[in-house]
Amino acid sequence: MRPTTKRAYALAGVDINLADKVKKAIGRQARTTFRSEVIGSEFFGSMFQLKGYREPVLVSSTDGVGTKLRIASLLGKNDTVGMDIVNHCVNDILCCGAEPLFFLDYIAMGKLVPEQIETIISGIVLACREVGCSLIGGETAEMPGIYSQGNYDLVGFIVGVVEKKNILDNSSIAPNDVILGLPSSGLHTNGYSLVRQVFGVDADSSRLNRLYPELGKSLGEELLQVHRCYYPQIKPVLQLIKGIAHITGGGFVGNVPRILPEGVAAHIEKRSWDIPPIFKLIQKKGDIKEAEMYQVFNMGIGITIVCSPRRVGKIISILPQAKVIGKIIKRKGEERVIID
């Protein structure tokens, strides 16, 4: 049989040989993250031997970077979004008290661009190394006709573990408990569709290069600030914490209630921390109501911690960046989060 299949597929927009080369390059980077528990990653499924736990509970999560990818693509800087997706997923499972074990990625684009993919992977690898997480597998898809030139999608999948007795089940959260906030590094990975509209980025990408004195950098540099990972900071105080909420899409209103038991609400004091300039700029330029800002963006707080009042001093001594931003109160109406 004549070897016509590969050529025909290439003419249809999919280059199998190039894909194989890209996957081999990814494999070389990924192996630098392997923990001792990784058995193999060359099969149809990757294997990880779980050991050292009495009653291990696996914790999984998946998420995407969203339209922040559009900013990265327009600026030709794709390593930071690789870090974003790992850090986002690590933070999500941290809310259960879990240690990250292994990570898988999914990258899809219309036509494979090896340099772009390797840059994305370099960011993923760097973030995985920083938290001791193995990049154990993934998928790189070439999908002509689905993605336009220069655009791509990036999704991450993570599995972590926590001893059953150490799960943060949030059931002990009660009135008078204290809410601490840890600062974000910017927008993290949420609200970018609104931001692109506010600044007219899709109509004129050069606006990303505009320098804003209040930011001390260009708009594009600010928007590509890496989503902060909180696991290394919070790990030493996990035993002192009742609950953790990752402030992502939906802001305070959408995320804090996810850890609140029935009968309680969260009272957030918005004047207890300084709102970073980027959020003030977005609100002013887009003429956005304050209530919507707190429902879309993190407003400078990337994660909230709930603890008993007697634990506050100890936690802040270990996490000096943490600030008291509110308290748990008895719920009186429909609202689960009151911001004033």
Image (cartoon, helix red, strand yellow):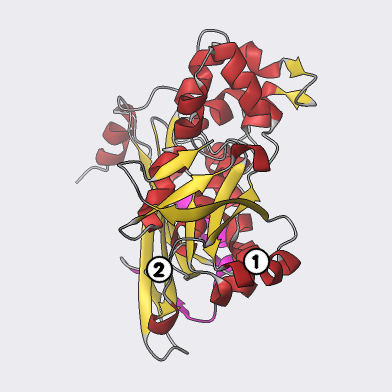
The percent coordinates of residue 248 (x first, y second) are 47, 43
Q: Are marks 1 and 2 in contact (CB under 8 Å)?
A: no
Q: In terms of secondary structure, where does tag 2 sit?
A: loop
> How many marks can you see?
2
Q: Residue at x 45, y 57 (%)?
A: 92
Q: Nearer the viewer, residue 308 or 301?
A: 308
Is residue 39 highlighted in magenta?
yes
Q: Quadrant of residue 233?
A: bottom right
Residue drawn at (38%, 57%), measured in percent from left and top?
260
Residue ID for mark 1 = 312
Q: Position of residue 186 (x, y in %)?
A: 63, 37
Q: Is residue 306 visible?
A: yes
142 vs 36: above or below: above
**Tag 1: residue type?**
Val
Nearest the eye: 218 or 338: 338
Q: Residue at x 54, y 11 (%)?
A: 200
- The residue under label 2 is 42
Name the residue located 49 percent from the left edge and 64 percent from the top edge.
94
Up-down relation of residue 148 to residue 189 (above or below): above
Q: Amino acid at mark 2?
A: Glu
Q: Residue 99 got which mark?
A: none
**Residue stretch rendered in magenta on the structure:** 20-43
The residue carrying pointer 2 sits among few (fewer than 14), some (14 to 19) or many (20 or more) residues within 10 Å by Cα, namely: few
Asked whether residue 136 appears in the rendered view, the answer is no
- Locate residue 58: give its quadrant: bottom left
Instruction: Give the mark toward the camera: 1 or 2.
Output: 1
